[in-house]
Image (cartoon, helix red, strand yellow):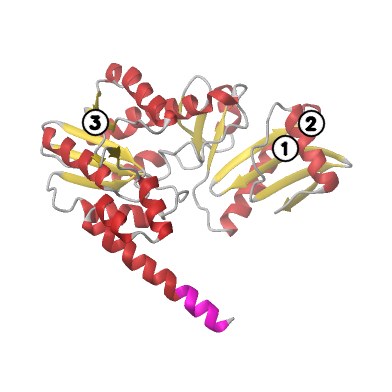
Amino acid sequence: MDIEILTSLRGRKLTAWEHLLEKTGLVPEEMPEQTVLIWEGDDLAATGSRQGNILKYLAVDPAHQGEGLLASLLTALRQEAFQKGHRHLFLYTKPSNEYLFLDLMFYPVAATDQVLLMEDTPNGVKSFLQTLPVETGGGTVGAAVMNCDPFTLGHRYLVESAARECDHFYVFVLSEDQGHFSAADRLAMVKAGTADLKNVTVLPTGPYLISAATFPTYFLKDRDGAEQVQCLLDIAIFCKYFAPHFGITRRYVGTEPLSPMTNKYNAALKANLPAKGIAVRELARFEKDGAPVSASAVRKALTEGDWDTLRSLVPPTTFQHLQKTSKEDALCKTAKTATS
């Protein structure tokens, strides 16, 4: 048995990798950061990859199953991930594969009928939630899950409107670094933009609520339905952990005239949350000059340097943040030019 850990695949190795994935019913979405190849002579017997803190493309050739290769794969991937600073790993798989990974110290987080999320830390999600502050005043508790890339007047309107209807309101900001602004920047903008609302708490989602941008689909038979599968998994995690931990009985969303994907997400929330004791409140989007205020419009204005439009679309705190980061970016570019 020969084990390789590679950052890129090409030629014969790429062909063998694609062939093994196809043989085991997996469809590659993208080239991962790191890939482990386990060879038995000239045959690729097993493979697995890592993208960030997510393990994916785990495949063992049927001719080599029962040889302990999955354990060897996970050991190599864990060692490589640890060297790169990833201490907490996740994987998505079919629910029928749960028993395979339980024996290798991966633990279930939540599942739907098509996908199971597992992590290598027992009770990791519960431990994460224990680090977050909980309002203990009772009454009606509401929540919204937002990306806020960046925080706009539309986001502010939804939070302020929802907070008026609740005794306490939580804003969970996605912790993925997949947008135009970092997770830390987005969280800071939301906190600054809602600081005057005394019954509002802004918290990160950690690695447990994700967007369609990072949800893997390589193991799904119907990849066109991936958005719905991802949405149902998010709902399962929210209902199983977040809602009971914080006492949430209302989930707030904004109407979405611009994004069909978000519309489907809202529909799934309305179809599934009430049965779990969580009401869904859909609030009309905040409009400016007859058009809904969107983060994409803010990003467009920022790219074009249209500060007058920016000022009209975001709270003063976001405007100040964008001005500051824009100046910092300009200084960095100037410094690079001077030293090049």
The reply to whether the magenta stretch includes residue 337 is: yes
Asked if disc 2 and disc 1 are in contact, CB closer than 8 Å, the reply is: yes
Using the image as rendered, state which of residue 50 and residue 9 is in the foreground.
9
Image quadrant for the N terminus?
Answer: top right
- The residue at 75%/38% (across/down) is 46
Question: Which residue in the structure is indicated by mark 2?
Answer: 64
Question: Which residue in the structure is indicated by mark 3?
Answer: 284
Please state the horizontal and vertical placement of residue 77, each as a whole percent of the image.
64, 48
Question: Which residue in the structure is indicated by mark 1?
Answer: 69
Amino acid type of the residue that numbered disc 3 sits on in the rendered structure: Ala
The answer to whether any part of residue 84 appears in the image is yes
Q: Please report whichever mark, 3 or 1, sits nearer to the chain's N-terminal start.
A: 1
Which tag is nearer the camera, tag 2 or tag 3? 3
Mark-to-mark CA distance, 2 and 3: 56 Å
The relative height of residue 19 versus residue 176 in the rendered view (above or below) is above
Q: Does the magenta stretch mainly form a helix, a strand or a loop?
A: helix
Amino acid type of the residue that numbered disc 2 sits on in the rendered structure: His
Please state the horizontal and vertical placement of residue 4, each as a whole percent of the image.
76, 51
SS at mark 3 in the image: loop
Image quadrant for the C terminus?
Answer: bottom right
Residue 221 left/right relative to 18:
left
Residue span colored magenta: 332-339
- The residue at 50%/19% (across/down) is 113
